Image (cartoon, rainbow, N blue to C red):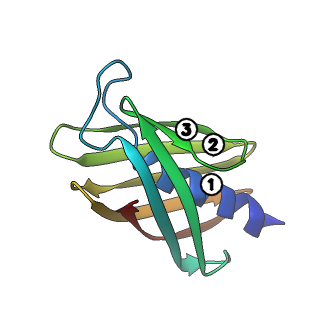
Amino acid sequence: MIGPMIRTAGLAAVALALAGACAEARTPYDGTWSVLIVTQKGDCDRAYRYPVRIANGVVGYAGEASFNVSGRVTGKGSVTVSVTRGQARADGSGRLSANSGSGSWRGKSSGASCSGSWTAERR
């Protein structure tokens, strides 16, 4: 039961990693991205891949899920993110470039935690 909550939080954290700095302005990171989340510590599934869409600097999951996402990408591509779903929370950070990105994430739910890395590719 903890695994699915952490997994969702981890997914959202990576999705957040693609968030834009400003909702009104187009950013160099706008577009569709494929994000791979890899768990390196904790009791979560080993890996997940999800589609993410950034429009006008705002990140959105390009599939079906229910979670709250907030985060930023600076003009230089530095990323900080936070994602919540129920009791689960995940935070991530990293960097995006024109066509790829990478970073780390950490999630917690009901006292259990997982952490790992994420990579992203523009599609």
Task: Name the amino acid type tagged 1.
Answer: Ala
- Residue at the spot x=48%, y=56% of the render? 14
Instruction: Tell which residue pokes out farthest to the right in this image.
Output: 1
| Image position of 93 with respect to 49: above or below | above
The residue under label 2 is 84
| Image position of 121 with respect to 76: above or below | below
Rendered image quadrant of residue 58: top left
Picture coordinates of residue 112, whole percent (x, y): 68, 65
| Image position of 58 with respect to 36: above or below | above
Please give the label number shown on residue 9: 1
Between 15 and 31, the residue placed more toward the observer is 31
The residues bearing labels 2 and 1 have C-alpha atoms spaced at a distance of: 6 Å
The quarter in which the C terminus is drawn is: bottom left
Q: Is residue 48 at least partly visible in the picture? A: yes
Q: SS of the residue at dot 3?
A: strand
- Residue at the spot x=35%, y=45% of the render? 80
Q: Are marks 2 and 1 in contact (CB under 8 Å)?
A: yes
The residue under label 3 is 69
Rendered image quadrant of residue 42: bottom right
- Residue at the spot x=47%, y=63% of the render? 35
Disc 2 versus disc 3: nearer the observer: 3
Decide: few, some or many residues near mark 2? Use Cα within 10 Å; few <14, some 14-19, many ≥20: many
